[in-house]
Image: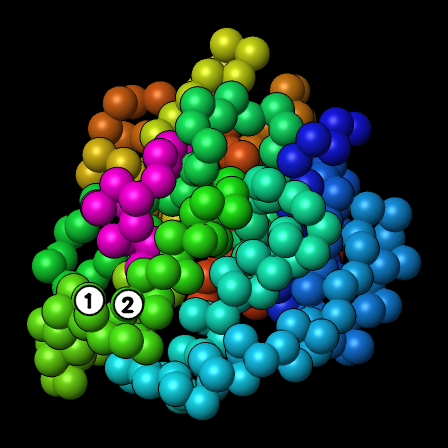
Amino acid sequence: MKNDISTVVVHDINSSFLETSLRITSTNNKVFLIGNESVKYLEKYENIFFVDINKYFEMEKFKIYREKFEYYGDKDVDTYYFWFMRLFLIYEFMKENNINRIFSCDSDNLLLKNINLYPFVAENAICIPPVWDEYYFASSIHAGLITQEFCQNYEMLYEDIFINKSRFNLIKDKVEHHKSNAGGVCDMTLYHYIVKMELVQVQNLLEPVLIDGLPHVFINNLSSPEGHQNKNQFKTKKGRIKIYTSKEDLSNSIYDMINEEYLNLFNIHFQGKAKRLITKRLEKKLFF
């Protein structure tokens, strides 16, 4: 297995789906798991390496961020704080281990193939859906190749918006909007502006690529049929993107209704309530 690009997962407290998820992702990828002692047992798997999350949260930098943290949204403060801090944790891990680029993978995001097989054309590559709504920003690193440069710009943007407030105007209208509408300002807002302001070079993982002559794609959310061209691009079943598995070529695919073709899946992101679908039964059904 190629190990030029390793994968990092940040998950602080053990969850029912976590072991199955990481067992799948680590089949073809080297995984660094940043979490607390409750997830350390997962390093029993050959390609999973546990990293203690507490040593980072004890740093002065994180103490300052926690003290000054403000959140704007419809969930509890700890949830929003953790969302924002995940990339800071990854950044500290990268600096500590002298790693310039790493593949970020949410714990509810299954990586079905070796990420080193993906034909990256930019230093950074994240999921960048179109902005369908003026106040809905969904660019994410649920699955994303990120460099230290990406993290540096994220840190700069975070401090300019939330600490010194020199760029608070970027989120001012969004903050007002969410006072009476669902949602809020989270880390995806910052990824949106990193892309929009062209702070770093970024490839869009939602755009299909050819691997061994076959089209492959990342999806942003199993519960949303959106693609890089259309809000309803992929065929669905029972409110989720329909996944086709083939024993003939050992593939997992989805159907693109806009371009009328099947696309091989590189990942599946089980966001929100869909996490409950990450089971041993699913593991036996998928090919990876």
Question: Closest to the observer: 21 or 2?
Answer: 2
Q: Earlier in the sequence, mark 1 or mark 2?
A: 2
Kind of residue at badge 1: Arg
Q: On the rendered structure, is 172 left or right of 119?
A: left
- Indicate whether 89 appears above or below 223: below
**Residue under the image location 68 percent in, 46 percent down:** 98
The reply to whether residue 279 is in sight is no
Q: Picture quarter containing residue 68?
A: bottom left
Identify the residue shown where x is 59% and y is 41%: 100
Asked whether the beta carbons under mark 1 and mark 2 sit within 8 Å of each other, the answer is yes
| Callout 2 secondary element | helix
Q: Which residue is mark 2?
A: 160
Reading the image, the residue beneath label 1 is 167
Please tell me in which quadrant of the rendered image residue 215 appears: top left
Of the 4 image quadrants, the one containing the N terminus is: top right
**Which contiguous range is marked in magenta?**
190-205
Which residue sits at x=10%, y=59%? Answer: 134
Please state which of residues 99 and 19 is positioned toward the viewer in this rendering. Answer: 99
